[in-house]
Amino acid sequence: MRRLWDRLPGPAPVKVVELLVLLAVLLVALFFLFEWAGTFLDSGGVVGP
Amino acid sequence: MGFRKILRRVGWALIGCALLVFAFLAYQLFVTDLLNDRLQAQAMEQLDDELAERRVELPEPEIVEVVEEKTTTTTVVRAELLKESAGEIGSTLGRISIPAIDVDEVMFEGVDTETLKKGPGHMPWTPVPGQPGNAVISGHRTTYGRPFYDLDQLVEGDRIEVETALGTHVFEVRHSIVVKPTDVWVTEDRPGAWLTLTTCHPHFSAAERLIIQAELVEGPNHAYAELVRLHGGGPEQRT
């Protein structure tokens, strides 16, 4: 975590914003990953080709 | 890089994977239920108003002929088909209740991913429940409120009630089968008026489909559907 903080460019307030953006991107990616993986658990039961 | 350092990294990677799997299961099994609960509560509040807006006045049964015989009196009534069509994809279609497994859900038009997150969905290319043919409704088994979780517990004779703008249609379970997800023949039309429920099978897997087929036994179109089933169509039915 500390290493990641050190690697982020800019002063501390900019780093905080960068971290928040990274976190948001990660959460959105996780959401799509979970939604996709969820279709193997339960696709909704539709019958079709 | 030393052996201990590699081992530590592998350990952290495994912990990360475990957390990811845990978060995935928590999202699928709990968060999706919460999302569905909110959507169902909203839909249930608006359901009566929406059905009242689309409500169809049912005609009184028209007596065509009364035949009196020695021991019985036969009344011949006109059996009209009361037509009903579904709304736009994603709109509310009605309510499905299955007392045997405590299901009481608002159902929607469409079987796309977003619609099924709200509740059971009606396949748009099949008739609306209560119309002649085979109306198909699909629903989640283990996520998004799991409306059809206990569908495998239904037995022959269990009742399924579907309320639409036309009225309440009562179906009785005739049989259940497990098929492949591509077995579209289960959605094909049948003589009379049928309701087919489809969901994933077994629990926590989308490998197969559990199919419940039920026949209309009461409702605004029961007389007409029975006539179609027995004689292939016609305007009158003996009661």
Image (tube, grey):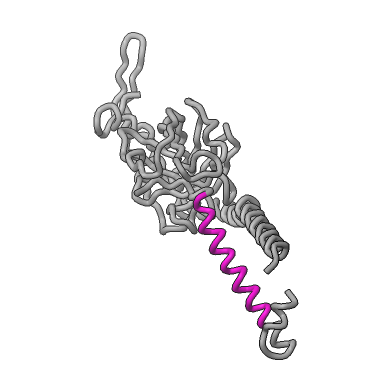
Q: Residue at x 32, y 16 (%)?
A: B68
Q: Does the magenta run of residues contain A44?
A: no
Location of residue B108 in the rendering, given as x and y in whole percent from the top left corner? 48, 52
Does residue B138 lie above or below B154 as drawn? below
Q: Residue at x 53, y 55 (%)?
A: A37
Identify which residue, B96 or B206, lies in the foreground. B206
Q: Residue at x 50, y 27 (%)?
A: B155
Q: Quadrant of residue A2?
A: bottom right
Residue that protrudes farthest toward the bottom in the picture: A11
Does residue B156 lie above or below B4 as drawn? above
Q: Residue at x 50, y 48 (%)?
A: B120
Does residue B131 lie above or below B53 as drawn? above
Q: Main secondary structure of the magenta part?
A: helix
From the viewer's perspective, tell me whether residue B70 is left or right of residue B95.
left
Q: Quadrant of the N terminus of chain B?
A: bottom right
Q: Quadrant of residue B72?
A: top left
Location of residue B239 in the rendering, given as x and y in whole percent from the top left corner? 35, 24
Location of residue A17 in the rendering, given as x and y in whole percent from the top left corner? 68, 83
Q: Tell me the magenta residue range.
A: A18-40
Is residue B45 among the parts visible in the rendering?
A: no
Location of residue B121 in the rendering, given as x and y in whole percent from the top left corner? 46, 50
